[in-house]
Amino acid sequence: MPRRNALPDPEVERGLRELEAALAHEPGADPDLATLVADVEAVRPEPDASFLAALDARVHAGFASERAAATPKRGGSWRARLRQSPLLLPGLGAAVAAGLIVVVVALPGSTTSGGGDSASSSSSSRPTTIAPLTGSGVRGGDPTIGSAPAAPGSGATSSADAAETAPSTSSSSQSAAKSAPLPAPTTAGPRKVERSAALTLTPAPADVQDTADGVVRETQAAGGYVQRSHVTTQDTRGTAEFTLRIPSAHLDDALQGLSKLAHVGGLTQASTDITATAASAADRLDDARAERRALLQALGRATTDRQIASLKARLADNRDEIAARQSALNSVRRRADLATVEVTVQGTGRPAAHGGGAWTPGDALHDAGRVLEVAGGVAVIALAVLGPLAILALLAWFAARTLRRRRRETALDRAA
Amino acid sequence: MEISTSEPSTARFDALYREAASDVFAYALTLLRDRAAAEDVTAAAFERAYRRQGSFDPRRGTQRAWLFGIARNAALDELRLRRRSAALLADPEDVTAGERAADAADHDDAALRRATVSAALAQLDPRERELISLKFHAGLSNAEIAKVLGVSETNAGTRVHRAVTRLRKACHAPS
């Protein structure tokens, strides 16, 4: 540490000049001081020749084999050093603690954020498998001829309207979709259930077209058809939207196939009991047909031209009514027979592990950037932990140094 | 003699050792007043210096100042750890002074003066004795003494002047 040099006292300066002259044995030096210098030099203690010879040997040997013997008797061992420097022990403890923290921080998956990222990425890179619906009356047969027994406590075939106004909906992420089958509608007889689903796939931007083609293939394989489609592909991103009509009996298999095409960003399934609506439409059709039969019988019994013309007009109206009601009934049946699946393909995800294509230089750059991000994060965390420890260690070192110096000076004073 | 730092480290250290071994011993003995302890400290100082050659920075002072700083720390550590310096105040050096006093009995003026100087040195306090040793025995400049003691050069010069003044007074004081 540099120390400030104040201006010396003139008398001191003169005295020092005289002393330097005497020490240099200059002819003009103060005779008294020159004598003192000579006398002090004469009483200078000299080492023994044997000691000098031994020290010569050690110096020429480079102190190689005598390190322990050459160090001061009580300063050589690590225990003695610890006794000499009481702050050395906490310093060592701090250093060990810092090392442990670094190890813990550096361990993969040991941080909360890292673990979360890891879990998220692993699940997102895995293709989703949709579990088949287990609700009876919906799976494995014509959903329009459901045979589920009545739930305990529910009225047989009653409250069809209530069932119709209480659709069951399942909205889940991919993992939830695996283990959350749709609850079976509580019915006591042949039920008609309208099913729908909305599926979001998030492949890599370059895979949008392939995924869209896969959607069409899976739909045709399930016996369905594409009711509406809109595909947009660009260099950096692409989107596709589909409205699929898939036989309800094959909906579960179709969803499984679709979910394997890319990462599933979301899946929503819904089912609505439309038994009452179908029964109502059938009843109304039966009524119209019964009316037609009655009109035909009345026409056979008509005798006047006016009666005949009136009945024919009513028959014509009845024919239109039957056609309309038949159409309504068919519509209801189609709603039960064909599930509606809305598929949205968004090219925002990462390449799928199974279909991401070759590992390109772009992928390498992306991975390298990711590695640098992680390394930078670890470095920041380590700095945040080690910075305060380093400051503490520095303060401890400075305090130990100051304390040691003071003890040395005190030892010199006590030697008086 | 100032050692060139461009020399190989072994040769440079060897030259430093040859030049300063006796001076370091004299300095250590002045502080410790125990010949065996002074020999131990001298050896320890040179070993520490040998091991720490890389820590010497020519910009922070001469190699002699660096070496005497190491020797001073080793001597003070020895003093602190042994805690027996008080018991040694009247040991070997007093014997030597006694011998010189016997010489004085032979009416040798030079021997008489030296006995007086030895007695005067023994009257000084350890810090003043240390300064006399560094200045007269080791031949350090005031700047080098300042580096050894960790004080400013002006302060070191003032202390040296004060110590010499006290020594001269002690020499002229009636016994």
Image: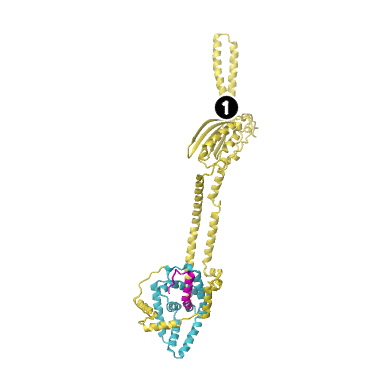
Chain colours: A yellow, B cyan
Assess whether residue A386 is covered by the magenta stretch: no
SS class, disc 1: helix
Q: Position of residue A29 (x, y in %)?
A: 36, 81
Q: Which residues are magenta?
A: B1-27
Nearer to the camera, A365 or B133: A365
Residue A259 sits in quarter: top right
Nearer to the camera, B141 or A121: B141
User: Which quarter of the figure is the C terminus of chain B placed in?
Assistant: bottom left
Residue at the outermost bottom position = B106
User: Which quarter of the figure is the N terminus of chain B placed in?
Assistant: bottom left
Which residue carries the number 1 mark?
A332
Left or right, residue B135 beside residue A142:
left
Residue at the outermost left position = A10
In the image, residue A109 above or below residue A228? below
In the image, residue A51 above or below residue A299? below
Nearer to the camera, A204 or B63: B63
Q: Position of residue A254 (x, y in %)?
A: 59, 34
Residue at the outermost top position = A304
Quick check: can you spot residue A268?
Answer: yes
Q: Would you say the magenta stretch is mainly helix, strand or loop?
A: helix
The amino acid type, in three-letter code, at marker 1 is: Val
In the image, residue A324 above or below residue A102? above
Q: Position of residue B172 (x, y in %)?
A: 40, 85
